[in-house]
Amino acid sequence: MTLLWATLLLACGPSPEDVAAQLASENPAVREDTARRARNFNSPVVIEGLIRALDDPSEQVRLNAIASLIALDARDAVPKLASMITADPSPDVRREAIDALGRMPDPRGVDPIVSLLEETADTRPPLNAIWAAGQLGDMKALPVLTRLRESSDPYVSYNANQALRRIRPATGG
């Protein structure tokens, strides 16, 4: 009998529509918690809610939404994540958006990562952007990574070399 009640309680969890609604709650604590738990709901309505949560005023909500989108491999979020790598006011959120683009290899993430590396090549490019370029493995990153390989900063040079090892020419089919 206890097993029956436990099963019924689990079946009574929130629906994807409930999760999406909680992501838009007026209460920031609810939005933060929901953005973290949303990774357990692989549903288009939840993914749409998480993408909207990337504009949340709370930095923690945005960070949790990014983590959930990565866990869900929600590639529909790539265009928004790409815009966040330079536009978000939080350095932590920008860093996590870059990581997300590297973890969800989608061709739409290549140009923004390459542009970021080109813009920062003469200063100190984010090491995770170099990593993401390697993860994406697109030949478009080859010129900037080759340039970064010659950096006097040993961390930049090392990471550029590692990323270059992952770049592969497209194979014809």
Image (cartoon, rainbow, N blue to C red):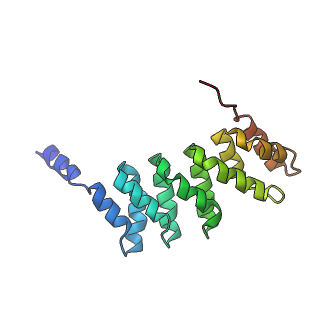
Given residues 10 and 109, the one toward you in this image is: 109
Q: Residue furthest top?
A: 173
Q: How many marks?
A: 0
Percent position (x, y) of residue 78? 54, 52
Left-right relation of 60 to 16: right
Q: Residue furthest front?
A: 173
Q: Residue at horizontal 37%, vertical 50%?
A: 40
Residue 27 position (above or below residue 113): below
Left-right relation of 30 to 151: left
Percent position (x, y) of residue 99? 60, 51
Quadrant location, the C terminus: top right
Q: Residue at horizontal 73%, vertical 44%?
A: 141
Q: Residue furthest left?
A: 1
Percent position (x, y) of residue 2? 14, 47
Quadrant location, the N terminus: top left
Percent position (x, y) of residue 124? 79, 58
> Hey, which quadrant is residue 126 in on the image?
bottom right
> Hey, which quadrant is residue 33 in on the image?
bottom left
Given residues 133 and 76, the one toward you in this image is: 76
Q: Residue furthest bottom?
A: 26
Residue 70 position (above or below residue 171): below
Residue 23 position (above or below residue 109): below
Q: Residue at horizontal 47%, vertical 52%?
A: 69
